[in-house]
Image (cartoon, rainbow, N blue to C red):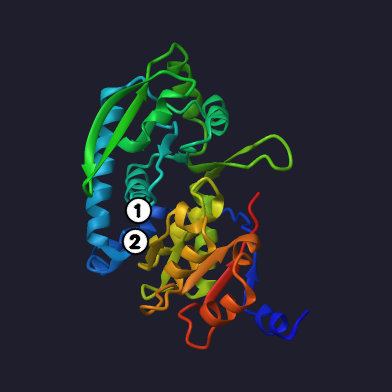
Amino acid sequence: ATQWQRQTLNLFLIFTYKIKMVTIFTKELISNLRTKYYNHISIYYFINSVLCNKMYKHLFEGADIVSSKLSYSFQRNNHISRYKYVGLLIRDMLYAPAILLGCIELGKPFVFMDVEGDDFNMNLENKLCIPVIVTLSEDCDTVGRLQKSYFLFDQFQLWNETLQIWITDPFKGDAEEENIYKDVERMFYAVQTSGSTGEPKIVQVPEKAIVPNINHLRNEFEITGDDVILLSTPPTFDPFMVEFLLALTSGASLLVVSQVTKASPYLFLDCVFPTDRTPLVTVMQLTPSVFMRWSPSQIQSRVLTTHSSLRVLALVFLS
């Protein structure tokens, strides 16, 4: 190893997520955000390379709209089991926190679907029988390519963007499934493995499994409301939920970077560690392959400088 590699190695934290079975509920962890962090910045994002932000009050206003619309959808379509997953087809991650928080407040488990991955979505449909899908209007074409038949039930505005709720037609097995799911532990969310080492598998995560992990990482990383956490992991992977919940349970801010920006090492670096303004990100988790797309000189001069805002760098491996 070079001297530079030896010097920076101790800054890397490589970890996996282990399940600890303790009953703690997410709604209890985030209940104080409405008062304590109401006027705190929840999301940083870019519009035409200009840095913008939304406060926690905007996040909760958006979440209230989502939860209200979803609640109405379930009430009017009583053939849908309340234990089933809400599918999310969201390309622009600016809207994801409000939608996720709306699902959490309503107690609905959720799973991210792939806007461009038809095979990925088909496996989710077959295994989870997703009856409700929330999507941005610009991503609704994906709904038409799904195996099931969905109809547009409702649409509404969230931060000047149109969101849609699609519902599947009822089928005769719904009543039986309702009885089956009553005895099943309530799930929080689900993710699907990439299938790179075999057939894709769906991992269903109960609330009591993920929350202790978040508590542990929040304490380990000493996350506070002053932190800015990079939200750049694809939402179909587990680490995305870690980034989201670390912020949501501590009052920290999220910096949202699009997958298009992340695809370019130069644009990604310029968004996260700019030279024309003070960097914001204090907590960042990346896969080693994404991190090493930056050259050693870029890492030395932009990421791991003595004046860097970054204090936690976590390298994670995606399954």
Q: Is residue 136 visible to the viewer in this orientation of the structure?
A: no
The quarter holding residue 35 reads bottom left
The residue sitting at 53% across, 35% down in the picture is 117
Q: Which amino acid does label 2 sit on?
A: Tyr
Within 10 angstroms of label 2, few (less than 14), some, or many (20 or more) residues?
some
Which residue is tagged 2? Answer: 45
The residue sitting at 73% across, 86% down in the picture is 3
Where residue 94 is drawn, which disc sits there? 1
| 101 shown above or below 126 | below
Q: Where is residue 211 in the image (x, y as percent from the top left)?
A: 49, 56
The quarter holding residue 272 reads bottom left
Nearer to me, 3 or 95: 3
Q: Where is residue 188 in the image (x, y as percent from the top left)?
A: 47, 44
Q: Is residue 191 left or right of residue 27?
A: right
The quarter holding residue 317 reads bottom right
Sequence order check: which comes first, mark 2 or mark 1? 2
Nearer to me, 267 or 44: 267
Using the numbered discs, state the Cα–Cα distance from disc 2 to disc 1 in whole angstroms.
7 Å
Q: Do the residues labelled 2 and 1 touch (CB within 8 Å)?
A: yes
**Disc 1 element:** loop
Q: Which amino acid does label 1 sit on?
A: Leu
**Disc 2 element:** strand
